[in-house]
């Protein structure tokens, strides 16, 4: 599969539309605005993870967890599974290009009509239920391609078990196979309607850990590549912090995450936009707007209010009488495990109940194979502590115990775990959760007594009855206990930026435009929110389809208000031929340098180091500082080592008060390591060239070098490799007028931090990472050895051997190394 994200070093200073987030809201916004002919930039905080790269072992899954805990953040900022721990309501969402669509269970169902009769929905939405909103559902269906699990597909024990439970609970309730965003049929040339490789489902059951089989219809497989096909530029690892007004437009402040910039307390980067579409998800959009309000943006007092968990209830029918085969393949084959099926394939629909609190759906699920082994002791412990067995006689206890032993000895595909039914309920809660920023600048959720609401008791009672039909042990959500104050977990958070008639009722209007104050109907014409955060009620069904329909409607209205036409024609195709993806090891590190800069020195200094030092002294005397924090990355370590002219990219920020009172954003940066300097035999330069953009629109070009000469002794090695000689030009290249010059240095403490940010890219194992890191280190040390002599004597033998071998292959009659 071809990657669609661009290096963040290529981001432009301004776009007509900046979309924040890449789930159903963001993917739709980027696709539709690009199809309307706008210049579109999409920012996603996570990484681009494509099929074949999702975790299928416990070790891999563990690395992909990040946790927002009351005591702070744990794990990688770009971890795929993002868990938010709160006192009463926990939330898990996805982090990656495609958002939560990467790890959800694919169900595309509309709510019952009475949901939209609730007065919490603005009149504009209620008026469009049969028109624009209906059209939104149709547009989403065209792109997401939901279809029920086919009759001709393999029989699934977990589906059959859910049908049996439905018959036990009440015959009048409807049991059926809901539409799911999964591909089951082989496509012509294995390409879908937007030119992306897709294959039929292999029934592995690993939907919610990430589909490695190209079968799941996430936004990464449709809306996002469609946006790219129409010219949208997509950037990952860009975590938006806050929004700021810029005349009639916007400044989007973001942090380049996953690079170590946080270790240096680096300032944010920015990109400008005429229109911002905020689609970072219920938690992300609310957090960004809360932080924007703290920075001075006027918004409704309803911001952060009316959060719903969509009445989510998790439960398990454990150690059932019949096998359910509900554990995904993981690293196992279909022959070993047998068909598990997509995560959700059936539903017991109870939304016809007269009582609002009794309306819900029960869906069966599957556990990803990556955590199957971990679930064996976890379920045994939970069953012992919380289990409610369907049978209590002595013989039943013996059978339960024997199957538990079998799982413990043979693993999750045997015994009690192979008879596990996972239940997922969506129902109606009161939507009274409140979100705010805590002392760690993290989003915190407060919802006292949420677990005491009637729908949760009704739902758990029904799941216990569903398990009785299977002869198993009902285990409710292990944290829904008195000890944990009936704490819940949801995968469907809604609200926080809800729609309303005015700012007294909601954060945005029916079009998704943000109200620009605490009262009235006035809006920011260029600020939209469109994702789960705008949904004002629980839906009692999986919300992805409704989020998609609402987002389609919002983009249609945005375009209509501006006289733009969205071309919805399908299929679409990539604008350029697929480029082979590099699977070679790369290298990345983040560096901070600080020093002094003088605008009084406006003559090109060339390589006159004394002139740079004079400029730095003048800057120091004037109190004119300069410093940057940049991330340097190369996607081809081999070429970086073998060809010193091969460039790496640079992205980050630079502070220079004489140029801009606010940090400047670094883009289109190029770094060359140890490039030979032709004007001086034996001398090499580390070159830095990058554009600088100020918030006031000023642009500069930064050109600098570190000098590594051949005639310095070993005592100069630190001074030479940690000193950068800087020239700044007006404009976007070195053809402009010289603005000033100076010198920057790396402080020892910052160098120590820099070493902790060193990362090897495109490797699959720790052993390979260490090997490539050693290669880079040896190359770096080897060049310094050639320049400075015996300072690196302890490493000389191994380095000389490798370098002689490489030299012998290219010039065998002329060895480059001499004995020391």
Image (tube, rainbow, N blue to C red):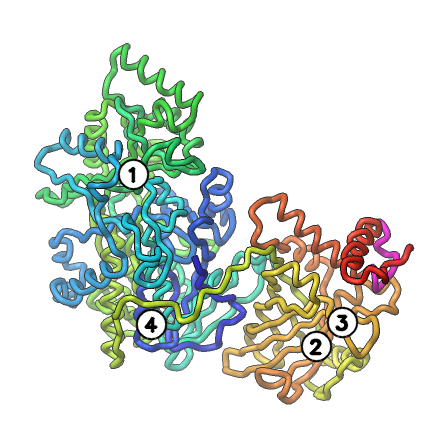
Q: Secondary structure at mark 4?
A: strand
Disc 3 vs disc 4: Cβ atoms closer than 8 Å?
no
Quick one: which residue is furthest to the top in this view? 394
Q: Secondary structure at mark 3?
A: strand
Disc 1 vs disc 2: Cβ atoms closer than 8 Å?
no
Residue found at x 67% / y 87%: 738
Q: Identify the residue position indicated by label 2 in the image.
A: 726
C-alpha distance separating marks 3 and 2 = 18 Å
Give the quadrant of residue 720.
bottom right
The earlier-in-sequence mark between 3 and 4 is: 4
Q: Pointer 3: residues within 10 angstroms few (<14), some, or many (20+)?
A: some
Q: Do we see residue 93 in this rendering?
A: no
Mark 1 or 3, closer to the camera: 3
For residue 365, the mark is: 1
Return the residue nearer the eye: 453 or 552: 552
Give the quadrant of residue 56.
top left
Mark 1 or 4, closer to the camera: 1
> Where residue 406 appears, x then y in whole percent?
39, 19
The earlier-in-sequence mark between 1 and 3 is: 1
């Amino acid at each position: 599969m071809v990657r669609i994200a661009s290096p963040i070093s290529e981001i432009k200073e301004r776009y007509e539309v900046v979309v924040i987030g890449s789930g159903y809201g963001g993917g739709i916004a980027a696709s539709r605005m690009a199809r309307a002919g706008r210049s579109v930039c999409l920012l996603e905080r996570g990484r681009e993870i494509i099929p074949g790269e999702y975790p299928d072992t416990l070790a891999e899954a563990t690395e992909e967890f990040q946790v927002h805990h009351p005591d702070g953040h744990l794990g990688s900022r770009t971890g795929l599974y993002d868990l938010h721990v709160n006192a009463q309501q926990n939330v898990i969402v996805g982090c990656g290009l495609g958002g939560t669509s990467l790890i959800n269970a694919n169900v595309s169902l509309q709510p019952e009509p009475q949901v939209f009769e609730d007065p919490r929905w603005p009149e504009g939405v209620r008026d469009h239920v049969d028109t624009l909103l209906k059209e939104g559902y149709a547009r989403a269906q065209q792109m997401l391609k939901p279809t029920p699990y086919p009759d001709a597909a393999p029989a699934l024990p977990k589906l059959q078990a859910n049908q049996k439970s439905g018959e036990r609970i009440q015959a009048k309730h409807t049991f059926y196979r809901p539409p799911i965003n999964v591909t089951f049929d082989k496509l012509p040339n294995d390409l879908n309607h937007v030119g992306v490789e897709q294959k039929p489902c292999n029934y592995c059951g690993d939907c919610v850990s990430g589909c490695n089989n190209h079968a799941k219809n996430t936004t990464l497989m449709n809306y996002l590549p469609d946006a790219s096909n129409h010219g949208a530029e997509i950037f990952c690892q860009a975590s938006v912090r806050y929004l700021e007004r810029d005349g009639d437009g916007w400044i989007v402040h973001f942090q380049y995450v996953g690079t170590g910039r946080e270790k240096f307390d680096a300032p944010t980067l920015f990109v400008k936009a005429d229109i911002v579409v905020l689609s970072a998800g219920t938690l992300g959009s609310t957090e960004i707007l809360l932080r924007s309000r703290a920075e001075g943006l006027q918004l409704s007092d309803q911001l952060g209010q009316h959060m719903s968990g969509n009445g989510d209830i998790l439960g398990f029918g454990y150690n059932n009488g019949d096998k359910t085969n509900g554990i995904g393949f993981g690293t196992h084959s279909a022959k070993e495990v047998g068909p598990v099926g997509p995560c959700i394939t059936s539903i017991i629909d109870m939304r016809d109940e007269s009582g609002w609190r009794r309306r819900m759906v029960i869906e069966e699920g599957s556990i990803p194979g990556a955590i199957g082994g971990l679930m064996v002791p976890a379920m045994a412990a939970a069953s012992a502590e919380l289990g409610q067995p369907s049978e209590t006689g002595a013989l039943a206890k013996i059978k339960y115990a024997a199957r538990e032993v079998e799982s413990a000895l043979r693993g999750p595909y045997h015994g009690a775990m192979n008879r596990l039914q996972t239940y997922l309920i969506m129902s109606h809660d009161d939507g009274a959760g409140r979100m705010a920023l805590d002392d760690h600048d993290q989003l915190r959720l407060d919802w006292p007594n949420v677990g005491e609401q009637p729908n949760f008791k009704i739902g758990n009672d029904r799941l216990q009855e569903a398990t009785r039909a299977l002869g198993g042990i009902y285990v409710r959500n292990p944290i829904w206990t008195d000890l944990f104050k009936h704490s819940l977990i949801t995968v469907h958070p809604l609200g926080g930026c809800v729609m309303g008639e005015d700012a007294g009722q909601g954060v945005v209007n029916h079009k998704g435009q943000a109200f620009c104050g605490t009262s009235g109907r006035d809006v920011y014409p260029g600020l939209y929110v469109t994702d789960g955060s705008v949904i004002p009620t629980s839906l009692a069904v999986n919300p992805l389809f409704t989020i998609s329909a609402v987002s389609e409607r919002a983009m249609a209205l945005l375009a209509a208000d501006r006289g733009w036409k969205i071309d919805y024609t399908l299929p679409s195709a990539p604008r350029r031929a697929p480029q082979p993806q590099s699977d070679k090891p790369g290298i990345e590190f983040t560096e901070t340098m600080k020093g002094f800069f003088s605008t009084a020195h406006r003559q090109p200094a060339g390589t006159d180091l004394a002139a740079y030092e004079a400029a730095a002294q003048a800057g120091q005397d004037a109190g004119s500082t300069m410093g940057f924090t940049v991330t340097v990355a190369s996607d081809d370590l081999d070429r970086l080592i073998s060809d010193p002219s091969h460039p790496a990219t640079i992205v980050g920020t630079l502070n220079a008060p004489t140029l801009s009172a606010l940090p400047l954003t670094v883009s289109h940066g190029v770094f060359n390591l140890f490039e030979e300097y032709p004007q001086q035999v034996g001398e090499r330069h580390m070159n830095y060239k990058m554009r600088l953009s100020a918030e006031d629109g000023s642009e500069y070009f930064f050109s600098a070098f570190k000098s590594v000469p051949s005639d310095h002794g070993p005592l100069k090695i630190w001074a030479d490799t940690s000193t950068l000689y800087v020239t700044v030009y007006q404009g976007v290249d070195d053809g402009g007028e010289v603005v000033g010059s100076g010198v920057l240095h790396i402080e020892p403490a910052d160098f120590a931090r820099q070493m902790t940010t060193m990362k090897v890219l495109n490797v699959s194992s720790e052993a390979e990472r260490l090997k490539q890191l050693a290669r880079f280190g040896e190359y770096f040390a080897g060049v310094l050895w050639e320049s400075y002599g015996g300072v690196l004597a302890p490493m000389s033998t191994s380095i000389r051997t490798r370098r002689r071998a490489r030299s012998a292959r290219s010039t065998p009659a002329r060895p480059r190394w001499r004995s020391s």
